[in-house]
């Protein structure tokens, strides 16, 4: 473990990032070009600047720990969706940027906690906070980011606070249900998808809702965009889970097959376990628990990549993307709707 004392004094990588970094997102291929793309890039710049401020502290070590995952980059999926939804109204409306930052801070806070629960060692290509420092530091840093998000929320009004509280309730409920696992009589696949809706879909939905609401979009369209956010959020998590299997270069931000190694049964593994094809008997044996042997891990990955279980999981991903696409029927035609539609396509094609 690297102690706190090792991080005190001198110029840290995080401090340097706070002065020099420029907005970046690894989710770029679906984003529009032209004027809309320019406006989104400018909006993301404002979000990044606000994130730097939000993770700041008079205490150097707190500043470094809180800025650790922000400095590592990432998709910025939630603030980007908030900014895009805001384009259907007044994108410079009061609270749009702040709400986008709240959603990203909430997401980042959950990552600190998730890495502790999963005993992860890498996050976004960098050492996870728990492996760099300790579980206690990671948990407390996540709490610090939640506190900063709450401070921003206080200026957005009681309704925003209420929406965020209910979103956070769903996030925690999903994490508890995932930790406890499917109960007797539960369908494991249904349980898994419900968990994704709570853990991932809820915050993505709130991102779209906040962006549209603070931009003054009419209530009916806000409802449609919120539903879109939930569907596409689940689709995006499903595509991340599939990337963990099909990626051969760590495109998911983790070493390929991390979930298998840790015994986390994502949708392809659940379909494999539920199957009865004799040809996949070996696969069922391998994915029934954590895989610590390197040879068996490589074997399981190859079997999954060519399995009917993976094809079924890809089909479910397409269903969620199609459902999200259908939510756009009430969105006015134009570059914003085109970009949201492109996102639905992207969540599917990124796994191929």
Image: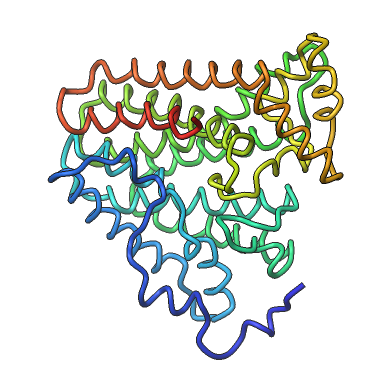
Q: Residue at x 33, y 23 (%)?
A: 223
Q: Is residue 120 above or below residue 276?
A: below
Name the spot of residue 341 as percent of width and height, x first: 30, 26
In the image: residue 340, left or right of residue 229: left
Name the spot of residue 275 as percent of width and height, x first: 76, 12
Q: Is residue 159 above or below residue 109?
A: above
Q: Residue at x 51, y 35 (%)?
A: 166
- Point out the image quarter for the N terminus: bottom right
Name the spot of residue 105 as percent of width and height, x first: 47, 54
Name the spot of residue 307 as percent of width and height, x first: 68, 20
Q: Residue at x 64, y 33 (%)?
A: 174
In the image: residue 303, left or right of residue 235: right
In the image: residue 115, left or right of residue 96: right
264 and 100: which is toward the camera: 264
Q: Quadrant of residue 197?
A: top right
Q: Quadrant of residue 328?
A: top left
């Amino acid at each position: 473990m690297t102690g706190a004392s090792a991080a005190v004094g001198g110029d840290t990588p995080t401090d340097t990032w706070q002065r020099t970094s420029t907005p970046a997102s690894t989710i770029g291929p679906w984003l529009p070009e032209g004027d809309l793309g320019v406006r989104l890039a400018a909006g993301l710049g404002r979000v990044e600047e606000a994130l730097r401020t939000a993770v700041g502290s008079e205490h150097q070590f707190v500043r470094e720990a809180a800025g650790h995952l922000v400095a590592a980059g990432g998709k910025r999926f939630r603030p980007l969706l908030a900014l895009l939804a805001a384009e259907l109204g007044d994108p410079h409306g009061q609270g749009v940027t702040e709400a986008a930052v709240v959603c990203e801070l909430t997401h980042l806070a959950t990552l600190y906690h998730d890495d502790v629960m999963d005993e992860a060692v890498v996050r976004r290509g960098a050492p996870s906070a728990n492996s760099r420092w300790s579980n206690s530091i990671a948990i407390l840093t996540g709490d610090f980011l939640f506190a900063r998000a709450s401070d921003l929320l206080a200026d957005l009004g009681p309704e925003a606070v209420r929406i965020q509280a209910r979103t956070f309730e769903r996030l925690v409920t999903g994490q508890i249900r995932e930790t406890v696992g499917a109960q007797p009589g539960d369908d494991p696949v249904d349980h898994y998808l419900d968990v994704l809706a709570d853990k991932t879909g809820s915050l993505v939905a709130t991102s779209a809702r906040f962006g549209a609401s603070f931009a003054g979009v009419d209530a009916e369209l806000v409802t449609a965009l919120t539903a879109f956010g939930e569907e596409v959020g689940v689709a995006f998590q499903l595509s991340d889970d599939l990337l963990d299997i099909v990626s051969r270069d760590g495109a998911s931000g983790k070493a390929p097959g991390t979930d298998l190694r840790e015994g986390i049964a994502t949708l392809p593994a659940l379909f494999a376990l539920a199957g009865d094809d004799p040809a996949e008997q070996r696969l069922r044996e391998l994915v029934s628990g954590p895989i610590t042997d390197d040879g068996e891990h490589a074997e399981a990955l190859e079997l999954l990549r060519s399995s009917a279980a993976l094809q079924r999981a890809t089909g479910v991903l397409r269903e969620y993307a199609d459902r999200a696409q259908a939510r756009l029927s009430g969105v006015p035609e134009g570059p914003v709707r085109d970009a949201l539609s492109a996102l639905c396509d992207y969540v599917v094609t990124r796994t191929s």
